[in-house]
Amino acid sequence: MVASTTPRPGARRGTGAPDDGPQRSGGRGPGRVAALIPVRLRRLGLPYLLILPAIVLELLIHLVPMLVGIWMSFLKLTQFFIRNWSAAPGAGLANYEIAVDFDSAVGGSLLRSFTVTVAFTVLAVGLCWLLGTAAAVLMQGSFRGRGVLRTLFLTPYALPAYAGVITWSFMFQRDSGMVNHILVEQSGLLDERPFWLIGGNSFVALLVTYVWRIWPFAFLVLMAGVQNISDELYEASAIDGAGWWRQLRSITLPMLRPVNQVVVLVLFLWTFNDFNTPYVLFGGSAPEEADLISIHIYQSSFVTWNFGSGSAMSVLLLLFLLLVTAVYLVTTSRRTSRA
Amino acid sequence: MREPRWLPWARWIVLGSLGLFTLVPLYVMATTSIKPLGDVQGDFHWIPTTISLQPFADIWRTVPLAHYFVNSLVVASIAAVASVTIAVFAAYAISRYRFPGRRVFSVTVLSTQMFPGILFLLPLFMIFVNLGNTIGVELYGSRTGLIITYLTFSLPFSIWMLVGYFDSIPTALDEAAQVDGSGPVGALLRVVIPAAMPGIVAVAIYAFMTAWAEVLFASVMTDESTRTLAVGLQGYSTQNDVYWNQLMAASLVVSVPVVAGFLLLQRYLVQGLTAGAVK
């Protein structure tokens, strides 16, 4: 769940050196012509030597398992074959057919989980972005207590996921929790104590907990983006008579567009794949209304020990994420370059 | 910037609400951890009626918390140091050399970040289990398996952040070192690494935090002897009861090291994020 980003195509740093050319960036001093050729040869090999350990690990832990996962999705990999998978018979497309047969129990619950995840992602990403932008814009300039606030805002993000989420799980307890204490006893908004961690309310509980934990990330990156906008732009526009709103709409938000593109994409991928929040909040298995796709696949794999079916679902999830990311990058890049 | 008169009000209302939203769970965590068990089972009270430090003593006995703590510490430290070391070399190559495959490498490594963890979980589980069965290398349930997994997961982010840092160090510095007789690796060790030290430490902290907080793989890949804090904290809920006060006390204890590290280094993280994100 580490922070992550994809570089914008065509937006690599401008060192002036042509990409993928064999020469170094920056100039080389004159002289020492004789030594040039062997040095060049050595230098050609050196970068590969430097990235070798990273490549080996990426291959072993990311690429090979990914290929293995795709292969597993075509096997009848049930509990009898987990310890000896070479004996597992092929399943053809059967695992996929079950997963997308929405009338079957497996396919139906996968579709429901997918729908829940889409709704959750749209709301959570929207809220995190909105809170992050509002806080970043309002924290512009200097005022008393700014440093303290910034530290406070970042704390939930720094907490290990389980520590923060488990606190929310306590606050959402029906009889001893803070939320019902406020809603029922202190404000009297409700007459009866609702359940928050089962039933329809669990979606709200999950959303609140998730936004509390992740919005600081949007804030952190957007704040850095806001700080990078040059003061001269504001000064020049102020001379031209632009007010605060005008500056927000015409300078701050447009200048944040490249940062926004990255933040929204990262938030989307994290949120869609989130496992920690429901797993800790609901203690292992999520209620139907908050059954995010990662925990759904996890549950259905480790409860039935049908890894073939679980792998097929994971591959479908990956294809969906690739599609959305590609469409997103193409549309946002086009819009950015036109602007 | 010229500020309209209502802005300070809007600022305090919005930022104040956000601050409250952020603060309340932290307050609940802290106050619950100093309540006796009886006080956390009934109605909720904002202000503790009885203050007891007993939960902080009990947490070590209810579950083998110290043991989990050591497991998490070992796994997260080794994963962080290894991840940063490997990332330093890779990031130096990407920042200072233009070689065929450079772009493919960067994009491939970064794109693994978008893949769902669950996609790797089932195959890695199978690979680890079957490696143990066939060639006797027990990665399943071992710390080594967890360390390799975590270090690879933080690698893309570490490389990406460090490329940003290295790019901000003038190449003239390495060239001067090379004129003085160091090779490219000597220049990296003697000039670039010292100059990028704050960034390197920030990235290491980040890798440490990631491993410290990881739940998905820890819940599947560990057994009783290698269990980490992420899974071990579940031990405070039994069939009949949840020891909420101890759970909050333990959450507080396991959060302190990473929160302190993060808050100390937030400035460097912001720099690194901007260097990477804005370009």
Image (tube, coloured by chain):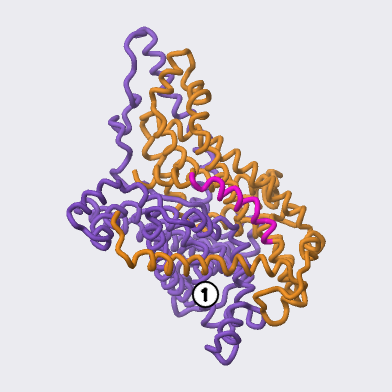
Chain colours: A purple, B orange
- A113 left or right, relative to A281: left
A327 is within the stretch colored magenta: no
At a point 47% along the width and 40% down the height, the residue shown is: B159
- A247 left or right, relative to B117: left
The image quarter in which residue A41 lies: top left
Q: SS at mark 1?
A: helix
Question: How far across and how far down the image is residue A313, in percent?
Answer: 48, 65
Q: Outermost residue, front direction?
A: B5
Q: Outermost residue, left direction?
A: A240
Can residue B2 be spotted in the picture? yes
Badge 1: residue crowd in 10 Å (few <14, some 14–19, many ≥20): many
The image quarter in which residue A140 lies: bottom left
Question: How far across and how far down the image is residue B72, in percent?
Answer: 68, 50
Is A36 above or below relative to A215? Answer: above
- Does the magenta stretch mainly form a helix, a strand or a loop? helix
Count the numbered circles shown.
Answer: 1
Q: Outermost residue, bottom direction?
A: A191
At a point 55% along the width and 89% down the height, the residue shown is: A188
Which residue is tagged 1? A290
Question: How far across and how far down the image is residue B203, in percent?
Answer: 53, 42
Magenta stretch bounds: B251-267
At a point 37% along the width and 53% down the height, the residue shown is: A141
B256 is within the stretch colored magenta: yes
Amino acid beneath label 1: Ala
Mark 1 belongs to which subunit? A
Report the quarter where the C terminus of chain A lies: bottom left
